[in-house]
Structure formats: structure tokens, C-alpha cells
Image (spheres, helix red, strand yellow):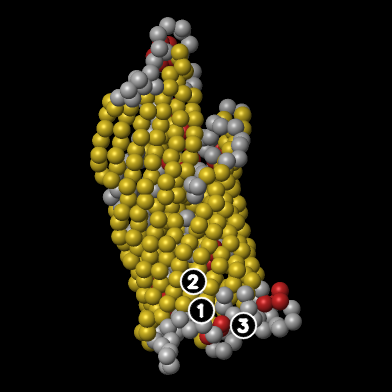
Amino acid sequence: MFAVVVAVVALSVTASAQTSSINAFSPYTMYGIGEINTPGTLTMRSMGGVGVAARQTGMINLLNPAGFSLVTRKSFLLDVALEGQNYYNYQTVEGAEKKSAYNSFNIREFAFLMPLAKNLGLGFSVTPYSSVGYRMMYDHVYDASDPVWGHVGRVNYSYQGEGDVTEVKVGIGYEVVKNLSIGVAMQYYWGDIDRAFVMTPVSITGNGSYGSVSGNSEYAISNIKAQFGVQWNALLTQKRVLTFGATYDIGGDLNPDVTSVVTGGDLYGTAVAADDNHLSITLPRQLTIGAFYQTAKWAIGLDYTYQEWTANKGSENTGVSGVEQSHMVVAYTDTHTIKAGMEFVPARYDTRRFWRRWSYRLGVRYGSHNQTFDDHKLQEYAVTAGFGIPIKFLGISSVDFAVEYGDRGFNVAKEIGLVRQKYVKFGVGFKLFAGAENHEYWFLRPKYD
């Protein structure tokens, strides 16, 4: 459980657009490891994030290692994506609307897939798992009974943080019998997160001076987890395919090393307190099940994901002590997310009209944030769209584009005084295939010197 000042969660800066290398800009990232990124390749994210049951030639299924078993022999598949984001946060505080906007642009994923043997594939990926990014200010409100106001004056608090946790995944998928594949992946998480605050008294009496106090906490994360997956083709004909899939992530404590320092406001920046410890931050146990249906023109997917976040028992205290009316309780909560998406290709073999060979995608995602505020859940949703342009006729290589619009806190943010957050994400990806489709054999031993 966390005791947190409501105004810390609020943004008290005027609306302004900024650009940085951070991957998120949200007051909700000041807890734990920050905002969890939607997993999957750009193609999957443009379909709402579905894909635990997806099996397509030329697809790197980052959601389910069992999908690695569908890999063309003597081939190599590379997937790289870039993503730009715009965050728009706003909140009503004492009748006034506070706003902020922020832009970022970063590499979103790097992944490849290659065959090891018949029906056995190896997948590798590097993707951002979570992101932290926030900058907030808070002025201690007037309270006649508070000794700070009576003897010092106003106190200004500023909070900021940034950092990322990256996931490196290595997995294999194997088709044990016809239409049934299993997979296992090892996931290595590493990253650094920095959080800082500054407390600055502002004298109103004209007598004396008061030094500021600043604090900084550095989180160093490095740990390994595992994921298991299965896919089953319930229907497989030349005209249609119906696949069911499931994954289970074991979760577990990341056990990050945390170095915390509090510094006084003298000329020498003297450290008045320092501590090295381990903070309990737990990745959720996660279960995902889904179905994926395909024809020559259509691909339709539906996924359900459950994450058990309530295993987090650690706590972080941030805020101003003694201002009870400004505190609220923040706690982890389990989440349930529904994802649905579709892909449409008008005519895959049309030799005259190039745009009819394009892939057009739509999707939607609905769930809740993984923390509650005074027992209030923040609902969130996202609507996605995208398209893919094949590089050559009957080829697998393509250039893909995606856009996502999301909204968090629309259900209770205004009523309980929190930030409502909207965002737009734009992505471009490059899928490069080496194999029979472009007569480029990377794993074929030459017969002649």
C-alpha cells in the first residue's frame, strides 16, 4: 500500500510539447517499474495486440514461443520497428484545468526467426518491457494549523523520473505432432530507473532562510524469467485455418538493487541520509488464451489476458507528511484484458492493382490499469489500425505502418481528482525475409566452389 499526495499524481505544469528519448510520459509511471508496454510485433499491435494463437508464414510471434515452430526451412526472418508517441495529460484542480503534452520517438523492437531443424524454430527479440517518464510539481496548500505555513511559508515539491526495463527473449518452438506445437522462452529483464524529488521552502516572513532538500533513488534491475506456450490447429484446410493458443508466464520478484540518497541544500550538497537495499517489485504471473481464424482474405483474432499483480507486497512512500486530506491509498490490483483484431487482404495474387495486395488491419483493446487509487480502478482502452505494403509480388517482406489511440482513467479520473491520460502512437516496421520468395538462401550449403 502506498500513501501518496493526490497533487503529486496531478500535473501542475502548463500545456507544452516536449520531445525526449524516454518511452513514456505519465504520472502513473512513478510507481514500480512504470508503464507496461503492449507486447507483440508492430503487425500484432495494429490488430489490438492479438496473436497468442497466430500462426502465419513470415510472422515472428513474440506473444507465444510455440509459434516459432512455423518457420520455413533455409530461411531467415528479421523484424525491426520504430515508434513515436504523443501523450496528452489533463486534470481539473480547484476549478482550473492543468494540461501537459509530450512527444517521444524510439526503436520499438528488434527480432529474428530462424530454423534449427524440421518443425523446430528459434526466435530472438529485444523489446522495451516497461517505461518510466514523469515531471511534476506541487505547491503545499495553505493550512493555518500547519506549523510549516505558520513559521516558514509555502513549500514547493518537484518530482521526476525516467528509465526503462528491457526484455530480451530467446525461445524455441517445436511441432511435436501434426497441428500441435509447444514452445518455451527465457526472458531476461534489465534496466535502470532514476527517481528524484526536490523540496524547496519559499519564505513569506522575510526572516531567515531555509535550505532545500533533494532525494534520488536509482533502481538497477537484472533478472531472468520464463514463458511457456502451446498452439493447436483445430481446423486446417487449404481454405481456412482455426488455431487455439495459450501462454503462461511464471512471473516472480525482480528484486532490484535500490540506492537512495537524501541531500541537504548547503553549498556542499551534503548527503544527510543514504541507503542501499532491495525493493520487492514483482512481475505478474500471466495467463493468456486466444483463437485465430484465417482465410485467403481474412485473419481474425481474439485474446484474453489475466495478470496477477497483487503479489506485489512492497511499498514506496512519496508525498508530504501531515497533510492527511491530500493523501490517497495506491495499491496493485489484478487485471483482465480483452483484445480483438482483424486483417484484410483484398486480393493477394492481383498482378495489376498493387494496393489490392496490401494488408489492412484494425483492432481494439480494453482492460484496466494495474493499480487502484483509494480502491478506484482506472479503466483504459485502445483503438488500433494499420496497413502493410508488400515489397514484391508473392513476397513476404513488407513495410508496415500502425497507429494507436488510447485513453486511461476516463471512468473515474475527474471524479476523484486524478489525471486523465490520452495518447497517440505511430509506428513503422520493416519485415525482411530471406528464403525462397526472393531466391536468397542463407542456410544452403553450396555444391560447387
Mark 1 belongs to which amino acid?
Ala
Query: Can residue 406 be seen from the camera position used here?
Result: no
Q: Position of residue 379 (x, y in %)?
A: 52, 50
Residue at image mark 1 = 434
Is label 1 in a helix, a strand or a loop? strand
Is label 3 in a helix, a strand or a loop? loop
Q: Residue at x 25, y 41 (%)?
A: 277
With 268 as the anchor, is 377 left or right in this view? right
Q: Residue furthest front?
A: 449
Q: Position of residue 78 (x, y in %)?
A: 49, 71
Is label 2 in a helix, a strand or a loop? strand
Q: CA distance from mark 1 to mark 2?
A: 9 Å
Pick the quarter of the image with the N terminus.
top left
In the depicted view, which residue is nearer to us: 362 or 413?
A: 362
Residue at image mark 2 = 78
Residue at image mark 3 = 394
Q: Position of residue 36 (x, y in %)?
A: 45, 53
Q: Residue at x 49, y 52 (%)?
A: 368
Q: Residue at x 50, y 47 (%)?
A: 21
